[in-house]
Image: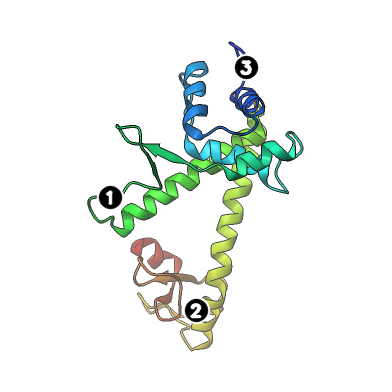
């Protein structure tokens, strides 16, 4: 029988998984979480995290449960119930077409929520650790963008673009020169970018 009191959601989820031998779905776990932690921001991405960390060969909790439990979890299929009780598998069809901005926001928010959850799980109650992990992830994402811009910036410079394309100010070297996308909806490319000075770049943002 599931305990009546839990200090953490993790303990509750693991207890349910153990007692059901992994034959449990998101809806059942959610009901238990809502009961014991009514103020929790529990979401489907959180359940997905626990499942992946248990069933994955490199998962954080791969050694917590036996192979039978992990097989049952891996085989679980998310189902949505209709009012009549029949199961419907998959996502609900949307009535209106989703714009690109709406799609980016929807997916981006889901990724962000999952990242926050994983960072929170890793940091626990250590505020300093949470701060450092946030900064580390942010810095690495910024480095990824810099790596994308660097070859485009060099190619523009090599093509003879050695002055600001906004004010005409000449550059002595590529150092300190900034790259600007003409169309903010498109990626960094030679066709879509130009070199500008910092002052002009601040005006075009």
Q: Nearer the viewer, mark 2 or mark 1?
A: 1
Disc assigned to residue 94: 1
Work out whether residue 61 can be spotted. Answer: no
Q: Nearer the viewer, mark 3 or mark 1?
A: 1
- Indicate the position of residue 60 as horizontal and vertical percent values: 71, 40
- The quarter of the picture where the C terminus appears is bottom left
Measure the alpha-carbon separation of dots 2 and 3: 61 Å
Work out whether residue 198 can be spotted. Answer: yes
Disc assigned to residue 7: 3
- Indicate the position of residue 23 as horizontal and vertical percent values: 59, 33
Q: Quadrant of residue 167?
A: bottom left
- The quarter of the picture where the N terminus appears is top right
- In the image, what residue occupies the spot 52% across and 16% down? 36
Q: Secondary structure at mark 1?
A: loop
- Indicate the position of residue 62 as horizontal and vertical percent values: 73, 40
Please, is residue 113 above or below residue 166 in the view?
above
Q: Nearer the viewer, mark 2 or mark 3?
A: 3
Please give left or right for residue 87 compared with residue 52 in the image: left
Closer-to-camera residue (184/18) = 18
Measure the alpha-carbon separation of dots 3 and 1: 39 Å
Pointer 3 local density, CA inside 10 Å: few below 14, some 14–19, many at least 20: few
Decide: marks 3, 1 in contact (CB < 8 A)? no
Q: Of marks 3 and 1, which one's residue comes earlier in the chain?
A: 3
Measure the alpha-carbon separation of dots 2 and 1: 51 Å
Q: Secondary structure at mark 3?
A: loop
Q: Of marks 2 and 3, which one's residue comes earlier in the chain?
A: 3
Closer-to-camera residue (59/3) = 3
Residue that badge 2 annotates? 171
């Amino acid at each position: 029988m599931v305990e009546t009191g839990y200090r953490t959601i993790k303990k509750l989820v693991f207890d349910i998984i153990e007692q059901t031998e992994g034959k449990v779905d998101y809806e059942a776990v959610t009901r238990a979480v809502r009961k014991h932690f009514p103020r929790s921001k529990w979401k489907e991405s959180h359940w997905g995290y626990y499942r992946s960390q248990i069933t994955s060969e490199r998962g954080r909790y791969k050694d917590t449960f036996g192979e039978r439990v992990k097989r049952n979890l891996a085989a679980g299929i998310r189902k949505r119930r209709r009012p009549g009780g029949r199961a419907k598998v998959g996502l609900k069809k949307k009535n209106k077409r989703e714009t690109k901005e709406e799609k980016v926001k929807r997916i981006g928010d889901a990724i962000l929520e999952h990242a926050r959850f994983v960072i929170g799980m890793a940091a626990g109650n250590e505020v300093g650790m949470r701060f450092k992990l946030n900064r580390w992830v942010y810095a690495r994402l910024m480095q990824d963008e810099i790596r994308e811009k660097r070859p485009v910036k060099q190619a523009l410079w090599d093509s003879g673009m050695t002055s600001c394309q906004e004010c005409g100010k000449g550059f002595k070297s590529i150092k300190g020169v900034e790259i600007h996308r003409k169309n903010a909806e498109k990626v960094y490319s030679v066709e879509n970018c130009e070199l500008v000075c910092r002052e002009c770049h601040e005006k075009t943002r």
